[in-house]
Each structure stands twice: as C-alpha cells, then as structure tokens.
Image (cartoon, helix red, strand yellow):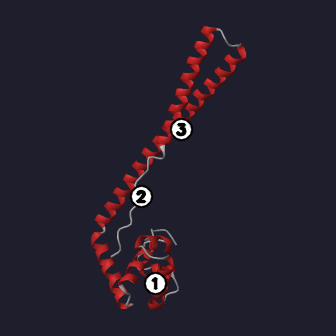
Amino acid sequence: MPPEVSPPPPSSGGWRPQLGFALALLGITALLALDLITDRALRQVGAAHLVVESLAALMALLTAAWVLSKLRRQKGEVLRLRRDLARSQANAERWRSEASELLRGLSGAIDQQFGRWDLSPAERDVALLLLKGLSTRDIAALRQTREATVRQQAQGIYRKADLEGRAELAAFFLEDLLAPPPRQEGQA
C-alpha cells in the first residue's frame, strides 16, 4: 500500500514579518513624536520641519494600524479555515468509520483486480494513487521517483488492464458504485 496522503500542516501565514514591520512602524512613530516634542520645546526648527515630521509620524502610524488590521483579519481567516478543516476531517473519519467494512471489501476487490491484471507492486501503488486523483507529478514526489517513471508505470497499467487512461481506470472501479438516485413517486 502507498503511504497515506495528508494535507500539509497549516502555516502561520507569515505573521512574524508583518508583525515585526508593524512594530517597527510604531517605533518610528514614537521616535518621530519624541523628536517633534523636543524640536518644539527647543524651538530650533521651522514650521515646515514640524509639518514634515508630523506627516511622517502620521503615515507611519496609519500604515502600522493597517498592517495590524490586516493581521487580525488573517488570523480570523486562519482560525476559520482550521475549524473548517477539523470539521471536514471529522466528517471524513465518520464516513470511513461507517463505511469501513465496505471499504475493506472494495479495497480487497481492487487488489484482486490488480492481481488479475498482473500489476507489479509499484504499478499497484501508482494505480491506487491514480484512483485517489493524484497527478503524476504528485505521485513521483510521493514515491520519490521521476515523473517519467510514473508515466511509464501508468501506461503499463492501462496496457495490462486494456484501458485507455486514468478516466477509464476510475470508471472501471467506480461506475457501478455510483448508482442513480432512487426515483420518487410521481417522477417520470
């Protein structure tokens, strides 16, 4: 059996550099404010200098506020995505638990068919990953091999199974599982 495919862990979204940038801007704002206070107290600079420093301090403060606001929104989005991921994982686990006996039977039936097609162990792994919907690039990375090797193995699978490609491979196993919904009374 190929290794389980799992999603990468959620990242922090790059908060540390953005937070550092916002803190640096707040520090610049504080230094400019201190400079304005001392300049005004010493009365050694003109009004134009005070206006320029005031505008620089205001721009730094507004930019810091914008970055912090953006970080807050990103944090909320990450939390929402983590909740959604946990809910999806729980649903998938519940489905696997409810269908475990059927999945074992299906897995056994797929393995028997792979045996009838005389697939090698490597071809069996590739065929299962193709059925899971992974790309040849993803399969190559997962199996730590070249993409060309995976393509050759896939072609060998299709040839041995007398199938045209990935869609027919999936249809071979799934077509009869996906029965149409039952008709309700009054429908034609």
Query: In the figure, 172 relative to 71: above or below?
Result: below
Q: Judge from the rendering whether residue 139 lies leftward or rightward of residue 46; answer left or right.
A: left
Q: CA distance from mark 1 to mark 2?
A: 26 Å
Q: Identity of the amino acid at label 3?
A: Lys
Query: In the figure, 43 relative to 131: above or below?
Result: above
Q: Is residue 7 visible?
A: yes
> Mark 1 vs mark 3: which is more N-terminal?
3
Residue at the disc numbered 1: 153
In-front residue for pair 31/64: 31
Q: Identity of the amino acid at label 1?
A: Gln
Mark 1 neighbour density, 10 Å: few (under 14) some (14–19) many (20 or more)? many
Query: Could you tell me which secondary element the residue under label 1 belongs to?
Result: helix
Q: Residue at x 44, y 91 (%)?
A: 160
Query: In the figure, 170 relative to 29: above or below?
Result: below
Q: Which quarter of the picture shows residue 125? A: bottom left
Residue 178 percent location from the top left of the image: 43, 74
Residue at the disc numbered 3: 70
- 3 and 2 marks in contact (CB < 8 Å): no
In-front residue for pair 24/45: 45
Image quadrant where one finds the N terminus: bottom left
Residue at the disc numbered 2: 8
Query: In the figure, 7 relative to 99: above or below?
Result: above
Q: Identity of the amino acid at label 2?
A: Pro
> Mark 3 vs mark 2: which is more N-terminal?
2
Q: CA distance from mark 3 to mark 2?
A: 24 Å
Residue 21 percent location from the top left of the image: 53, 36
Residue 22 percent location from the top left of the image: 52, 33
Q: Residue at x 57, y 33 (%)?
A: 66
Query: Could you tell me which secondary element the residue under label 2 belongs to?
Result: loop
Q: Residue at x 40, y 77 (%)?
A: 128
